[in-house]
């Protein structure tokens, strides 16, 4: 065996870390689009904005 288990784990862990970073960046950009209302005009996009804004209002009311 050319590579040991520790090297394989390190390679897999690095790839997983990079994937998590890309996913986090996507979610950050998507949240900004939701806040600005620029995530699209389809039924699903409108529904997503509606749920997001209602959730924000609910959280703000619960905090007060």
Image (tube, rainbow, N blue to C red):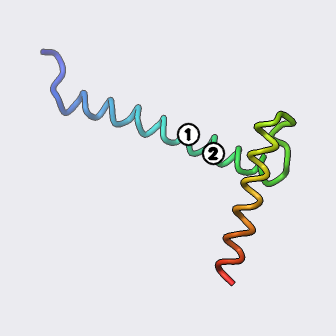
Residue extending farthest to the bottom is: 64
Query: Where residue 63 appears, x then y in whole percent?
Result: 65, 80
Seen in the image, is 7 located left or right of residue 31? left
Which residue is nearer to you in this view: 42 or 4?
42
Locate residue 1 relative to residue 53 in the image: left or right.
Answer: left
Query: Marks 2 and 1: in contact by CB < 8 Å?
Result: yes
The image quadrant that residue 23 belongs to is: top right
* Figure check: 49 above or below 43: below
The quarter of the image holding the N terminus is top left
Query: Residue shown at 47%/36% (left/top)?
Result: 18
Q: Which of the labelled discs sits on residue 45, or is there none? A: none
Q: Is residue 23 above or below residue 28?
A: above
Farthest residue toward the left?
1
The answer to whether 14 appears left or right of 64 in the picture is: left
Picture residue at 85% right of the left edge, 43% below the top: 38
Q: Which residue is mark 2?
A: 27
Quadrant of image for the C terminus? bottom right
Residue identifier under label 1: 23
Q: Secondary structure at mark 2?
A: helix
The alpha-carbon separation of the residues under discs 1 and 2 comes to 6 Å
Q: Is residue 53 above or below residue 41?
A: below
x, y percent for residue 44: 76, 37
Coordinates of residue 46 in the picture (x, y in percent): 82, 43
């Amino acid at each position: 065996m050319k590579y040991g288990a520790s090297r394989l784990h390190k390679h897999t862990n690095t790839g997983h870390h990079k994937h998590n970073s890309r996913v986090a960046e996507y979610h950050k950009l998507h949240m900004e689009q939701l806040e600005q209302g620029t995530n699209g005009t389809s039924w699903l996009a409108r529904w997503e904005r509606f749920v997001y804004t209602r959730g924000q209002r609910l959280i703000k009311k619960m905090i007060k």
